[in-house]
Image (tube, grey):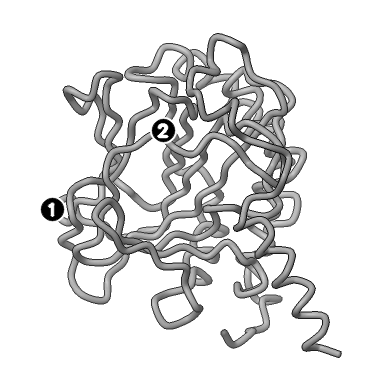
């Protein structure tokens, strides 16, 4: 991807120092706790409009990067968790969303203390979906092999100016027994969605997108972790099967990084 001079753009460094975010976290904390079918919040106009517009302009499109592609019966979409493939402004934004100040925002909002960011952006970063793409209802992976930590909170920020209702792309939140969708959230520009990650947090975008060709549903996906979890929330037997040995994907990350040094030398 060509690297353009971002000095003319709005640098997001220190973005979440603004006390507005502490106020937002406090204002929406009760909403998080009482939301159905599981804890979540939706906040519109989340970023400063000028910054959001700059990040939207910097968001990679189909031919801008080599995407990680998921294409199977449950999932058709693209994402890129390797920040070295992204433009500088996007990298700055992702790091701000992993910053101390943003962690404090998420902790205050959710009441979940001791959150850790994911510097590897496993499964996260910019996500891109086009016409016909979908993501079936699911509960997310719950363990990070590199961090050795439990996944606790997802944060999504949508980057879709001019998005039309009839194009679909709504994030659906389903009840525990999977009998109904209890909330449908359109992917509107500068809308932030945060929700609790647990075995019963059933969500997805199951209806294939009907947006015009060349129009994409774009989102920044960030995931947050803790090294502990309440015993009554550890319900999936696969927790007992995870070992300290790295997953194949984690090993691949390290191999690719070391390979870049050899190739560069």
Q: Where does the N terminus fall, quadrant-wise?
A: bottom right
Disc 2: which residue: 42
Crowd around label 1: few <14 · some 14–19 · many ≥20 (10 Å): few
Q: Do the residues labelled 1 and 2 touch (CB within 8 Å)?
A: no
Q: Is residue 220 left or right of residue 132?
A: right
Which secondary structure lies at badge 2?
strand
Q: Who's the residue at 67% across and 82% down the image?
A: 5
How far across and down, in percent of the image, does residue 246 sit? 69, 49
How far across and down, in percent of the image, does residue 33 sit? 48, 13
Classify 52 as above or below 244: below
How far across and down, in percent of the image, does residue 70 sit? 37, 62
How far across and down, in percent of the image, does residue 230 sit? 62, 13
- Residue in front for this viewpoint, 169 or 116: 116
Q: In this view, does 198 lie to the left or right of 263?
A: left
Alpha carbon distance from label 1 to label 2 = 20 Å
Disc sitting over residue 128 in the figure: none
Q: Quadrant of residue 175?
A: top left
Q: Who's the residue at 74% across and 56% down the image?
A: 13
Classify 73 as above or below 172: below
Disc 1: which residue: 166
Q: Who's the residue at 64% across and 68% down the image?
A: 89
């Amino acid at each position: 991807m060509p690297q353009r001079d971002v000095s003319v753009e709005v640098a997001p460094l220190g973005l979440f120092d603004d006390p507005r975010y502490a106020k937002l976290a406090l204002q929406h904390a009760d909403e998080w706790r009482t939301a159905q079918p599981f804890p979540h919040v939706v906040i519109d106009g989340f970023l400063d409009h000028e910054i959001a517009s700059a990040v939207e302009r910097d968001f990679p499109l189909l031919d801008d990067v080599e995407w990680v592609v998921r294409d199977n019966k449950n999932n058709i979409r693209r994402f890129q968790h390797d920040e070295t493939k992204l433009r500088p402004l996007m990298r700055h934004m992702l790091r701000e969303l992993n910053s101390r100040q943003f962690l404090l925002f998420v902790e205050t909002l959710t009441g979940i203390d001791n959150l850790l960011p994911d510097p590897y952006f496993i499964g996260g970063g910019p996500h891109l979906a086009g016409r016909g793409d979908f993501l079936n209802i699911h509960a997310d992976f719950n363990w990070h092999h590199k961090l050795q930590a439990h996944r606790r909170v997802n944060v999504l920020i949508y980057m879709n100016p001019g998005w039309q209702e009839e194009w679909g792309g709504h994030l659906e939140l389903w009840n525990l027994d999977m009998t109904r969708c209890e909330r449908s959230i359109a992917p509107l520009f500068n809308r932030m969605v945060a929700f609790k990650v647990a075995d019963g947090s059933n969500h997805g975008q199951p209806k294939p997108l009907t947006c015009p060709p060349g129009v994409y549903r774009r989102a920044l996906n960030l995931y947050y972790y803790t090294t502990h979890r309440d015993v009554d929330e550890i319900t999936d037997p696969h927790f007992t099967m995870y070992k300290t040995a790295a997953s194949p994907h984690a090993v691949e990350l390290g191999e690719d990084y070391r390979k870049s040094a050899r190739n560069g030398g």
